[in-house]
Image: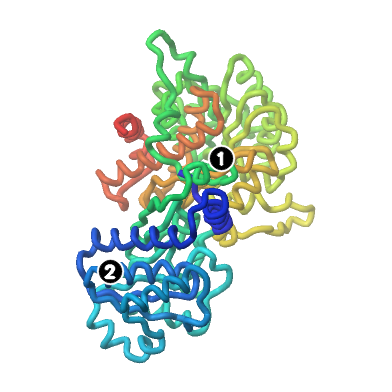
Amino acid sequence: MKVVTAKDMRNIDRKTVEEFGISGTVLMERAGLSVVSRIKELFGRKKIIVISGSGNNGGDGLVVARNLHSEGWDVKVFLTSRPADMKGDALRQYEAAIRYGVSVGQIDHLLSRYPSIFSRHALIVDAVLGTGLNKPVTGGLSEVLRLINSSGLPVISVDIPSGVSSDNGQVMGDAVRADYTVTFGLPKRGHLLYPGAELSGGLFVEDIGFPHELLESESIDTELIEGQEICRLIPSRRSYSHKGNYGHVLIVAGSRGRTGAALMAAKACLRTGAGLVTLGIPESVADVIQSRVTEEMTLILPDKGDGTLSEKASQKILDFACKADHIIAMGPGMGVSTGTERLVRNLIRGSQSPLVIDADGINCLRGDRRIFGKIKCPVILTPHPGEMARLLSPPLPSSGKRKISMSVQEIEKDRINTAVSFAKDTKTFLVLKGVPTIVASPDGKAFLNPTGNAGMATAGTGDVLTGMISGLLGQNKDTLHACVLGVYLHGRAGDIAASEKGQHSLIATDIINNIPAAFHSLKKE
């Protein structure tokens, strides 16, 4: 399903009216009726307060009020602006509500008498501000939004909770905390990005008659990953085949004290279907790792004597990978040192095999994005927000003081655009981990992952994801599909694990153990 910005939605609205001949009044009526239907389904017959603004969102609210009033419901409307400030379809809906005998008053009346008014009603419809909000909410409107939140009544928001940015989910000064949100046509980015996702409550996406070709337009560059669609990306397993048909992944990982990261990545890779997995490990920790592997093979690599890989390992890795159609994954538990930094750069410059770079593999780059101008193969990077901030920083100067060009907080406020911009600039595939995880491709497309839970905020889950994406890439050879399917399966396995063990007790190996169940659940959809 496509996910839109405010601009995208305005274009859909405009083209529906201008090119397909469906009037704005008809769309507004359908929007209001879809909210009415959800109110009946969720709450039954209640005494309702509708708080309407002056724009189209307020017009939708007036449609809700008029239709419920016509069915005999007790409905009170409070306007946050004067009727003289309303225009177009919203004004027509106001005039229709008055003609139908709907009780319409000014917001000042509610503000002065809210204790008694709230006590006589059971539900608030928030139709104050819509998706076009582009500046912070201040003054009297802030007071209104805070009053809604303090009412103690359930709230159903029309299109998006008032005060939430539809483009990035940020709170624009103040915002309504809705129990449910009914939106139209397509979900907005602000419904899926935090804190907007939390403030939206239960989300319903209603069909109000927008043409299908507009909702599926290629000009909309963001999509929500869905289970039914993701099933098509699962690599097939032919009856007449062998392990060589399903990819050989070389995982360059581990260092003294961090061998677990390498082992988890390898086990996850196998559980995701890779035919062969080899662990490229520092010589001085080889005994530790070899005593714990079963299905995995090992490639012993030169180290610096301190348990971290040496630059000398570069050629041995490249020679190994070029023997067949291998995938190279690197970074989990690898550590950051002069040797590992040079090793990572050598592999990026010299590899003919697809690369998956995570964790310390990213940290070793010290913000050197220019190196991706030298790549000869597909590259996937899987940073969490902290690693993303380091990746976006300039290379370390001779003074040793690094200037951070973008903070974690700034990245979190604009996750989609941050990921897409980096992927386009570097011609790489970026998996920006977090809530939600974003997959961005070099052509400017973004995919939002809906699976996963807070229990996955624990050590090693990123290493598991690296192994899963690498294993899928070895099977289907499609870089984008490996990323999209990998993050979805990873979150699904985490959700299954949390349902069994609870979020507090979930650990990374629980995700690995539930990869088979995640595959099985997808095949049922």
Q: Which residue lies under the disc numbered 2?
A: 68
Answer left or right for 500 relative to 481: left
Viewer-nearest residue: 504 or 197: 197
| Residue 376 screen position, x and y as percent | 70, 28
Tell me whether circle 2 and circle 1 mark residues in contact (CB < 8 Å): no
| Residue type, mark 1 in image | Asp
Q: Position of residue 493 (x, y in %)?
A: 35, 39
Q: Which residue is label 1 attached to?
A: 358
Left or right of 162: which side holds 109? left
Residues at marks 2 and 1, CA–CA distance in whole angstroms: 54 Å
In the rendered image, residue 243, in percent from the top left (x then y), is placed at 45, 14
The local secondary structure at tag 1 comes to: loop
The crowd level at tag 2 (other Cα within 10 Å; few <14, some 14-19, many 20+) is many
Q: Quadrant of the N terminus?
A: top left
Identify residue type, mark 2. Answer: Leu
Q: Earlier in the sequence, mark 2 or mark 1?
A: 2
Image quadrant in which you'd find residue 226: top left
Residue at x 50%, y 20% (from the top left corner): 247
Q: Is residue 73 above or below residue 382?
A: below
- Judge whether residue 449 can be spotted in this image: yes
- Tell me: 199 left or right of 425: left
Pick the front one: 434 or 345 = 434
The colour style of the image is rainbow
